[in-house]
Image: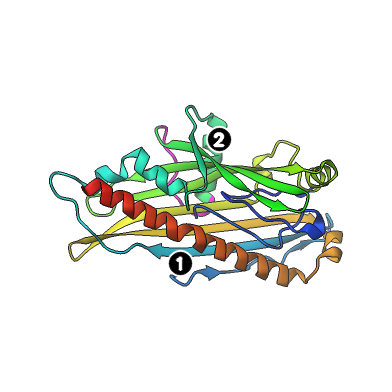
Amino acid sequence: MVRLSTVLSGIALSTTLCAALPLDMKLSSWFGTSNDGDVAVVSDSKDTKKSTTSLQFVGSFTHQSEPAPLPDNGKDINDFFNQKEKRRVLLEGSGEHLVTPIEKPTPEIRQRWKKEAKIMGSTPPSSDDNMYLVTIKGVNFPGIKMNTIATIGTKVMLNSDFPEYQATMAMSDTKPEGLRPLVWVVNKLTGASTEMLYEDQTTHSFTRVRAEVNNGEVIFKAESNLVVDLKFPSFLLKILPASKEKVEEQGSEALQKALEKDVVPMINNFREEYIKYLL
């Protein structure tokens, strides 16, 4: 059974497969290696023994703010990064996400965060790191809407010159709403009606935002990465409207554009909060 998980604004699903396979993707969040944005497709595996195949979508994007003055009058850039309400702006992305703190994360959720940190190369969590639920505005299709809730682990790393904020997705949950026949089909194909085990997790994401000081000024730089790895019955390839390679290419391109759409305003909003902090 295919299990689709999405990060932040979620994965738009193909109406051809009743939202079961991703042909167009949208990510709003977090989640880079070049200013132009790198997209890589690295999946071309097929498990003939189990009659399954896979699709992989990979996006990365880097963006930095305009320079801003360094703090004075006793204010400190580490203090700015350490304020939860300021960092919350980053989780809100372009401003459309609903961010809710998780008061007491369970050991199971923290363990998922630890595993995802190992996969994505982020810093493992400690007991006092904060976690949030980020509710994403639904993606609409004829007769159905896909809603996503992402569980994000956040970590602030303070340094005299280069404080850094990390956000790692521990898990996500996508729920369909709409016409009952379509909801039933999506639940059956994606496993959305069943509890997701860690082994079923298909979406992995990590974003870091750090301050860099140069020539008496500070810039804020975001590096965002997202990988979506889907496995599904091989027979479904026959009803794809394009080749597997083309679907992966189109999905990665759409994901890349969505990263850019969300990361740029995110960093701009964070800089605006910093300017307010200086006043």
Residue 52 visible to the viewer: no
- Bin the neighbour count of mark 2 within 10 Å (Cα to Cα): few under 14, some 14-19, many 20 and up: some
Residue 119 percent coordinates (x, y): 54, 52
Image quadrant of residue 252?
A: bottom right
Q: Residue at x 21, y 61 (%)?
A: 217
Residue sticking out furthest to the left: 73
For residue 241, above or below residue 15: below
For label 1, the SS is: loop
Q: How far apart are the alpha carbons under marks 1 and 2?
A: 28 Å
Determine whether, in the image, residue 144 is placed left or right of residue 174: right
Determine whether, in the image, residue 85 is placed left or right of residue 227: left
Residue 61 percent coordinates (x, y): 48, 64
What residue is shown with label 1? 33
Residue 106 versus residue 121: which sits nearer the camera? 106
Label at residue 109: 2
Q: Residue at x 57, y 32 (%)?
A: 108
Residue type at tag 1: Thr
Label at residue 74: none
Task: Tell me which segment is drawn in magenta.
Answer: 119-127
Prevailing secondary structure of the magenta residues: loop
Determine whether, in the image, residue 13 is placed left or right of residue 263: right
Q: Residue at x 66, y 65 (%)?
A: 251
**Sequence-wise first label, 1 or 2:** 1
- Bin the neighbour count of mark 1 within 10 Å (Cα to Cα): few under 14, some 14-19, many 20 and up: some
Residue 178 versus residue 226: which sits nearer the camera? 178
Residue 92 visible to the viewer: yes
